Image (cartoon, rainbow, N blue to C red):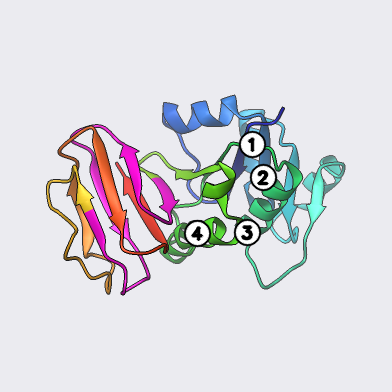
Amino acid sequence: MCKSAVIICDGEFPRRPYPLYLLGAADRIVCCDGALKHLIRKGIEPDAVIGDMDSAPASLQKLYKDKIVHDPDQETNDLTKAFRYTVTKWPELEEITILGATGKAEDHTIANISLLMEYERTYNLSDRGIKLMMVSDHSTIFPICNSCELHLGEGRTVSIFSPDTALTIKSEGLRWKTDSVVFDNWWKASRNVTSDDVVRLHFSHKSMAIIITN
């Protein structure tokens, strides 16, 4: 059974042990077309290569022709194409990790991080028991949509972002409580620190938010 999948994007390819471990341990590897070169350098075979193929040389397209999934949709980026393919192809997945989605270009980084909330909302990942996270050499990022209990460990840096200005998140286990935070700008609940091993967040209503931990 396929329980874990990794999606590789053409951002900053990880070098540290944790993200590389996740890559090596994955049951399935899906690669955005522009990121194929990273896997080739590592000698790793993807299960699928997704995109409009504008970033993959013709020689590589020929070499991986049996694994290419051509998606010419210009209304979405290659990460969304790869995610859509992954979650549809293997509905039994329990964990999806996205690597290489940050770094290099700030606009891509912001856009890719925000997409985690869209995926959570569109595919009801939490209700389906699918854990989604974006991992780099510097942080782990994941979406949340409702009250939750997070086992993060004491002394971790935690930032919370949400596009919902009506959302209130009451917190336990953080050095600075978020109870009165209005999410009308990105800095509002950033760079907090866990004061306990477990952080409890209580949403005023079901919504969308992103957690970034270092």
Q: Label 4's element?
A: helix
Q: CA distance from mark 4 to mark 2?
A: 15 Å
Residue 149 point in image, percent of width and height: 33, 41
Q: Nearer the viewer, residue 120 or 170?
A: 170
Please tell me whether residue 160 is drawn above or below residue 17 in the rendered image: below
Residue 94 lies left or right of residue 102; in this view the side is right
Magenta stretch? Answer: 141-170
Q: Which residue is mark 2?
A: 31
**Amino acid at pointer 3:** Thr
Callout 3 touching callout 1 (CB < 8 Å):
no
> Residue at (72%, 41%) from the top-left corner?
90
Q: Which residue is mark 4?
A: 112
Q: Label 2's element?
A: strand
Q: Earlier in the sequence, mark 2 or mark 3?
A: 2
Q: Earlier in the sequence, mark 1 or mark 4?
A: 1
User: On the rendered image, what quadrant is the C terminus found in?
Assistant: top left
**Amino acid at pointer 2:** Cys
Q: What is the quadrant of residue 43 in the picture?
A: top right
Instruction: State the mark number for residue 39.
Output: 1
Q: CA distance from mark 1 to mark 4?
A: 20 Å
> Residue at (70%, 43%) from the top-left corner?
91
Please tell me whether residue 182 is drawn above or below residue 104 in the rendered image: below
Q: Residues within 10 Å of mark 1 (few under 14, many from 20)?
A: some
Please tell me whether residue 40 is drawn above or below residue 12 in the rendered image: above
Residue 206 point in image, percent of width and height: 41, 62
Q: Earlier in the sequence, mark 4 or mark 2?
A: 2
